[in-house]
């Protein structure tokens, strides 16, 4: 799936500043935003890597690598871009496989301010890592060298995830 801007709408210019907070929040209230969430898998151990959020929202919680889909990105390109930015791993978009697609209204509590509701269309993808990529990721976590969005992470056994977090 590729996302295109409306006809006659100019593409964003990277050197220009982000939109105002007010406009950003209005967009989240009125439009569903496309997101890519990524699960990294160590095929040798069968475990999945999930980072720990280092910033709000959800600081300190286990999370996905990922974020918004950029204009013109396929979901696989978005996944590759976020993994490179957040974990420092260069994984070709062809190595990502779809896991699921769902929509969600994510509510962020903001003390002293109105709740921020994000209507999101999430795409979850997985990539099997090569042994050297697993080692690189482990080194980045140990040296606290992931992006500022994350304060670390851990490998999780899928059976433990299923047993403790999923309702079956």
Image: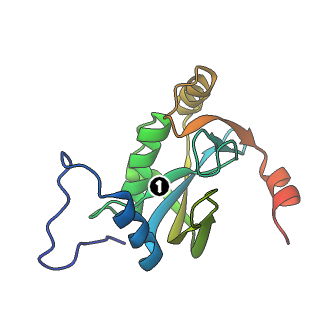
Dividing the picture into quadrants, the one containing residue 75 is bottom left
Task: Identify the residue at the far right of this view.
Answer: 163
In the rendered image, the residue lying farthest to the top is 143
What's the residue at 47%, 63% (across, down)?
Answer: 35
Image quadrant in which you'd find residue 144: top right
Q: Return the residue found at the far front.
A: 112
Is residue 84 visible to the viewer in this orientation of the structure?
yes
Which one is in front, 154 or 94? Answer: 154
When the figure is inspected, residue 54 is found, relative to residue 10, above or below; the finding is above
Look at 47% across and 55% down and name the residue there: 67
Please tell me which residue is depicted at 53% across the width and 40% down the height of the picture: 149
Quadrant, the C terminus: bottom right
Q: Position of residue 111 (x, y in %)?
A: 64, 56
120 on left or right of 161: left
Say if 113 sits above or below 92 in the image.
below
Which residue corresponds to mark 1? 67
Q: Secondary structure at mark 1?
A: strand
* Total labels drawn: 1
The percent coordinates of residue 28 (x first, y second) are: 45, 70
The image's colour scheme reads: rainbow
Q: Residues within 10 Å of mark 1 (few under 14, many from 20)?
A: many
| 5 on left or right of 89 | left
* Image side of residue 55 versus residue 78, left or right: right
142 w.r.t. 95: above or below: above
Residue 164, image x and y in percent?
A: 87, 56
Q: Position of residue 153 (x, y in %)?
A: 66, 36
For the question of whether residue 45 can be seen, the reply is no
In the picture, the quarter occupied by the N terminus is: bottom left
Is 11 in front, or is 79?
A: 11
Q: Which residue is drawn at the image coordinates 59% and 67% (left, top)?
A: 115
């Amino acid at each position: 799936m590729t996302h295109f801007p409306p006809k006659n709408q100019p593409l964003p210019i990277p050197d220009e500043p982000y939109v105002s907070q007010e406009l950003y929040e209005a967009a989240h209230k009125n439009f569903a935003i496309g997101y890519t969430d990524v699960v990294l898998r160590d095929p040798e151990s069968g475990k999945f890597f999930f980072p720990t959020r280092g910033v709000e929202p959800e600081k300190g919680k286990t999370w996905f690598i990922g974020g918004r889909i950029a204009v013109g990105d396929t979901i696989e390109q978005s996944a590759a871009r976020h993994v490179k930015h957040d974990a420092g791993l260069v994984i070709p978009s062809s190595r990502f496989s779809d896991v699921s697609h769902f929509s969600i209204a994510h509510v962020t509590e903001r003390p002293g301010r109105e709740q921020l509701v994000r209507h999101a269309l999430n795409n979850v993808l997985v990539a099997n890592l090569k042994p050297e990529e697993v080692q690189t990721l482990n080194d980045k976590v140990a040296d606290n060298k992931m992006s500022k969005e994350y304060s670390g992470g851990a490998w999780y056994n899928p059976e433990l995830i299923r047993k403790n977090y999923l309702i079956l």
